[in-house]
Image: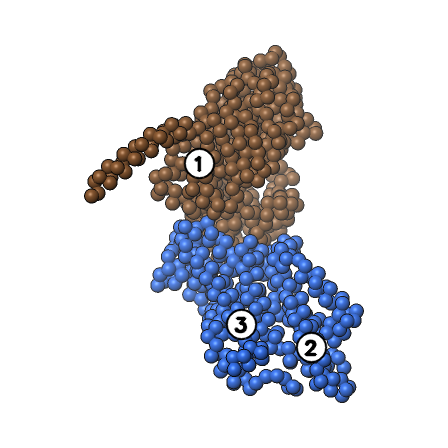
Chain colours: A brown, B blue
Amino acid sequence: MNKPFKTTAFASFLALSAAFSPAFAANTAINVGMVLEPPGLDPTSGAAAAIDEVVYANIFQGLTRFDENGAVLPDLAKSWDISEDGLTYTFHLQTGVKFHDGTDFDAEDVKFSLDRARADDSTNAQKALFADIASVDVVDPATVKITLSKPNGSLLFNLAWGDAAMVAPESAADDATKPVGTGPFKFDEWAKGDHVTMSKFDGYWGTPAKLDKVTFKFISDPTAAFAAVMAGDVDAFPLYPAPETLSQFEADPRFQVIVGSTEGETILAMNNGKAPLNDIRVREAIAHAINRQEIIDGAMFGYGTPIGTHFAPHNPAYVDLTGLSNYDPEKSKELLKEAGLADGLTLSLKLPPPSYARRGGEIVAAQLAKVGITANIENVEWAQWLEGPFKNRDYDLTIVSHTEPMDIGIYGRDDYYFDYHSDEFKKIMADLNNTTDPAKRTELLQAAQKRIAEDFVNVYLFELAKTGVANAKVKGLWKNQPTQANDMSAVYWED
Amino acid sequence: MSEILTEPSEHILRSAFRSKSFAIGFALTILFVAAALISFLWTPYDVTVMSIADKLQTPSATHFFGTDHFGRDIFSMIMVGARTSIAVAIIAVGIGVVLGVPLGLAAASRHGGLLDEVIMRGNDLIFAFPALLIAILITAVFGPGAVNAIIAIGIFNIPVFARLARGAALTLWTRDFILAARVSGKGVTRISAEHILPNIMNLLIVQGTIQFSLGILADAGLSYVGLGAQPPTPSWGRMLAEAQTMISLAPHIALFPGFAILLTVLGLNLMGDGLRDLFDPKIRRGRG
């Protein structure tokens, strides 16, 4: 009774799969989920991470680029020579490179792009990357010479940022709405509020992309993101916003969970210029009152690495300084007593929207309460956060993740919202900029990490994990997030 | 009281509880009010203490309603959340009654006059805006928090009570006993306070109950979008909002606050309906 039925069913299954297999084999389109929609699509004129998450390495390329582990690789520049004094970089460009509008890419475009980015009236969000460039000169169509005003050991690294992407003079003005780059994908369409699509560029100079079509879909609500992945509306969600549901995907063979590292140092920032936080004993007391593992478990469902300074743990120069600010509530109380605050104190705690801040903030407030510190939570939107804590230093405590790569230099900026001023730290940074020897640089970077940890500028909570979800058949996605990017050039569907 | 159209109170209560919907509504309301009051003295667990290791436990003998994503006891949070919701709703309705009723009575006493026009057009102005949107605007401008939520919800109760009081008072002003009071030399303010107000009290109570349930709903809505009471104070709306991404993982953390809102609002509405049936002479006589 049962057997004939099974056989029939199997036979019809075979027939069906035969009918459908060409369609499966030709699966060369992918839908990628993102939480935030970019405000524009020009990486050279906006700070939003979402811009690079769409266009980096897909539409736009730079002279150098990051790989998935953060290493700097040649991109549009196939090689370079550095002069003895470290002041002149000669880049040899790839040949036969075309922009998506059909125009050629050559040394003139490099000069145009870099001069545009570092011009006085430039709207580039990371102008500091180009600060040491004195001039950009065209030697011949395939060679460019960059002259620096002083040695800068991180020039190749700086040029790998999305903000240093190569653009064409013919199309640069419209890049925000109609991006034209040299990458393996060309821009098709942007349906505002919903998606951006791009398709394979046939005239690409390098290894052609394996996918024909990539659609970035914008889904900000974590519940909707979960539903979209479950239903297969989205094939990959590289920065998945609901870590609490990851265990379900892990248990489901249709999906893969990709956990990697990011450059996101999540910190409990303190207003160093405002009493009583201008007292290092108070800041140290707060540091010892925080139990990092509890925050990682409670807010991030276990995804995240504890850090003791403002530096990514996967970086070779990282020093583990978590012991300096270990969880020790008794020590906190003692320090508060020393600072004359034995009766406790009240501080504001402003929390931007991401769940690491909102959930983490509630745990931080509960932990601070145990040592007699009342933290008044105030949930704010990003615009309010940028205007209040970030711009006007209107805060005591706030939680935020700094996702830019290698951004320890912000501690040397007098106008930054931590209000931290240390001549010693600034000297370390100045030395670092004048040093190209890798071993010496590592030493200086470690000194910088120690300086800010010993000054208890902020409480360094954890390195944000990159928790992504994707269909189990999607291969070639980045595991880590060394910069803001979703590089789709090597992604393919496994048969 | 003067010519008040009521019956002896014993009789009212007896017939009230004969109405099933009133009895159920009353019981539900008492249940949540009691939970809120008891929470001042005792809750099974401290709602501000987190125990991450015990997170997302399902309901059990140690945690009646389970634990949330921080390992806090949901039963205790519902109790304290009831306190927040009820306090916000009571004060908001109080604002509406204290400001709205005198305005309505004043408007009725000067029917057709300038004062009447000013008050009632002012009411129309507030009515013209969608209540929840303005509440969001107010909390967005003045910052989120329970106090601002109370003000935002309270403002929208003012015209409701003003209009009700005016409408009811207008019909009374034509009655003979009011004329008698005028002839005896009482001023409009005294008449409003001594003769009109007691006679519209029943309407106000019914409306108050309904507004109270709307207030709870509005508070839940505001705290759902993050504009109500701020953490760590538990609030039903925020509990729901925080639970929504975990609903497939731990449905209980969304179900319990959801039921709490549903049952409170249902209870108050049933009670309001019961009271209206009771006070409305037409319906009462119809039941015979």
Residue depicted at 71% across the width and 71% down the height:
B103
Which type of secondary structure does the marked residue at label 3 adopt? helix
User: Could you tell me if residue B54 is visible in this image?
Assistant: yes
Q: Chain of mark 2?
A: B
Identify which residue, A89 or B243, lies in the foreground. B243
- Which one is in front in this view, the residue at disc 1 or the one at disc 2? 2
Residue at 59 percent of width and 28 percent of height: A179
Specify whether A193 is left or right of B20. right
Q: Where the N terminus of chain A falls, by quadrant?
A: top left
- Residue drawn 65% across and 71% down? B164
Left or right of B123 in this view: A483: left
Judging by the rendered image, the residue that carries numbered circle 1 is A235
- State if disc 2 and disc 1 touch (CB < 8 Å): no
Q: Residue A309, relative to residue B136: is it above or below?
A: above
Looking at the image, which residue sits at the far bottom?
B184
At label 3, which amino acid type do we have?
Asp
Mark 1 to mark 2 CA distance (whole Å): 67 Å
Identify the mark at residue B273; answer none if there is no mark: 3
Give x and y (percent) for residue A384: 62, 47
Callout 2 secondary element: helix
Q: Do badges 1 and 3 share one subunit? A: no
Q: Is residue A345 above or below residue A30?
A: below
From the top left corner, tell me how far across and down residue B129 is, in percent. Answer: 66, 58
Type of residue at label 1?
A: Asp
Number of numbered markers: 3
For the residue carrying disc 1, how many other residues have a C-alpha within 10 Å: few (<14), some (14-19), or many (20+)? many
Which chain is mark 3 on? Answer: B
Horizontal relation, residue A459 to residue A168: left or right? left
Q: Which mark is residue B171?
A: 2
